[in-house]
Image (cartoon, grey):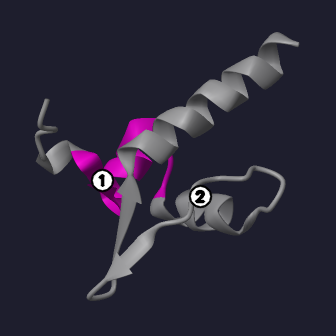
């Protein structure tokens, strides 16, 4: 089965900040905080793009850590 490409594969920095209800400054801090292990963006023409699959995996890992 052929996998469809969609605009939902990547989110901009603004979309990620909105997803987690944080400010762009907080997102900047999350990216640099090694303890959080937050997914690192790909930079294209000075725009940060985050892979949705990496964000979802990070969310699941955080949920597992909280459950313990």
Q: Position of residue 54 (x, y in %)?
A: 49, 46
Q: Which residue is mark 2?
A: 26
* 7 and 23: which is toward the camera: 7
Q: Is residue 67 above or below residue 65?
A: above
How many marks the image carries: the answer is 2
**Residue 21, visible in the rendered structure:** no
- Residue 39 within the magenta-colored segment of the rendering: no
* 40 and 28: which is toward the camera: 40
Residue at the front extreme of this rendering: 1
In the image, taking residue 8 as reference, residue 29 lies left or right, namely right
In the image, taking residue 39 as reference, residue 36 lies left or right, namely right
Q: Position of residue 10 (x, y in %)?
A: 29, 54
Q: Residue at x 64, y 53 (%)?
A: 38
Q: Residue at x 16, y 38 (%)?
A: 3
Q: Which mark is residue 11?
A: 1
Residue 58 falls in which quadrant of the image? top right
Q: Residue at x 61, y 25 (%)?
A: 60
Q: Is residue 34 above or below residue 36?
A: below
In the image, taking residue 20 as reference, residue 8 lies left or right, namely left
Residue at the top extreme of this rendering: 67
Helix, strand or loop status at disc 2: helix
Q: Position of residue 42 (x, y in %)?
A: 41, 72
* 1 and 23: which is toward the camera: 1
Residue 39 falls in which quadrant of the image? bottom right
Q: Which mark is residue 62?
A: none
**Over which residues does the magenta segment extend?**
9-23
Decide whether the magenta segment is chiefly helix, strand or loop: helix
- Residue 17 within the magenta-colored segment of the rendering: yes
């Amino acid at each position: 089965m052929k996998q469809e490409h969609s605009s939902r594969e990547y989110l901009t920095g603004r979309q990620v900040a909105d997803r987690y209800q944080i400010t762009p400054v907080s997102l900047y801090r999350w990216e640099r905080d090694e303890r959080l292990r937050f997914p690192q963006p790909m930079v294209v023409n000075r725009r940060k793009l985050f892979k949705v699959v990496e964000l979802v995996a990070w969310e699941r890992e955080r949920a597992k850590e909280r459950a313990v």
